[in-house]
Image (cartoon, grey):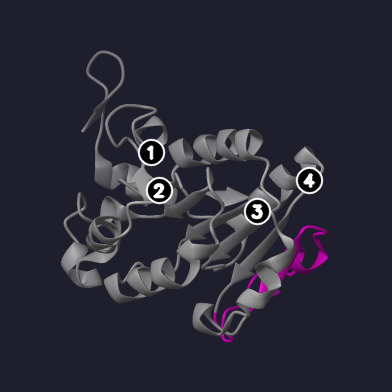
Amino acid sequence: MFTLGKNKNFRLKDIDAGHHKVTYKGVPAIKCPFDYVLYQMIIAELQPDLIIEIGTNKGGSALYLGDLLELNGKGTIHTIDLPENKESEMLHRHPRIRIFKNGFDKYDTSLLANYKTIMVIEDGSHMYEDVAATLHRFAPFVSSGSYFIVEDGIVDDLGVAASYNGGPQKAIREFLAANSNFITDRKWCDFFGPNATFNVNGYLKRIS
């Protein structure tokens, strides 16, 4: 439970309901406001040449990230989803967004050779198997000092992790146990308080 001011309590389920209604430029974005703030700080600090976003949906998040890159004056976002996804047409007109619609497993990783600083965001199905597969496939391309951000580990706190076969946090635990070159960066996970983020334990930093 979040408490702000005298007798004002904010329940996690209410914040979850609200985050499903968040838009950016009128396009559904479905992001916790805490994480929106963290993203703009990470991108300003990291200055990535490429962001890979797994899970486009309608594209509000991709538009937001693309605009942050535009403000930096550098960088591209590759947003990946499935052929049946119907993203906003605004994505097709953005100079820093490229859309890939054959799923993460068919994304051509040879495209990554020309990028120095690469950051990855996993915001797909949140199913344990898919998160584990994207970590395995894309983590090797994350540059040292950059991030693989696994979204929505909050499903554990919402009590619905079983619906995702264990969900993102199960995949994170297994990945970190097998990959000593990544750590959970507490700077971002705990920025607003211990794991006051929807990406619980999910800001994974490559340290070597």
Residue appearing at x 27%, y 31% in the figure: 194
Compute the Cα span from label 3 to label 2.
30 Å
Tell me the number on the disc at residue 185: 1
Location of residue 168 in the rendering, given as x and y in whole percent from the top left corner: 30, 61
Secondary structure of the residue carrying tag 3 is loop
Residue that numbered label 3 is attached to: 26
Is residue 25 shown to the viewer in this render?
A: no
Q: Nearer the viewer, mark 4 or mark 2?
A: 2
Return the residue at label 4.
Answer: 70
Q: For residue 77, which quarter of the picture?
A: bottom right
Name the N-terminal-most of marks 2 and 1: 1
Image depth: mark 3 or mark 2 in front: 2
> Closest to the observer: 145 or 28?
145
Residue 88 on the magenta span? yes
Q: Decide: marks 1, 3 in contact (CB < 8 A)?
A: no
**Earlier-in-chain disc, 4 versus 2:** 4
Q: Earlier in the sequence, mark 1 or mark 3?
A: 3
The residue pinned by badge 2 equals 204
Q: Percent x, y for residue 59?
A: 62, 63
Magenta span: 82-100
Residue 78 is situated, as x and y percent measured from the top left of the image, at 66, 66
**Which one is earlier in the sequence, the residue at label 3 or at label 2?**
3
Task: Locate the N terminus and report the quarter of the image it occupies.
Answer: top left
Q: How far separated are the C-alphas under marks 2 and 1?
A: 6 Å
Amino acid carrying label 4: it is Glu
In 3D space, how far apart are the residues under numbered discs 3 and 4 (Cα atoms)? 19 Å
Q: Nearer the viewer, mark 1 or mark 3?
A: 1
Residue 64, above or below 97:
above
Q: Are marks 2 and 1 in contact (CB under 8 Å)?
A: yes
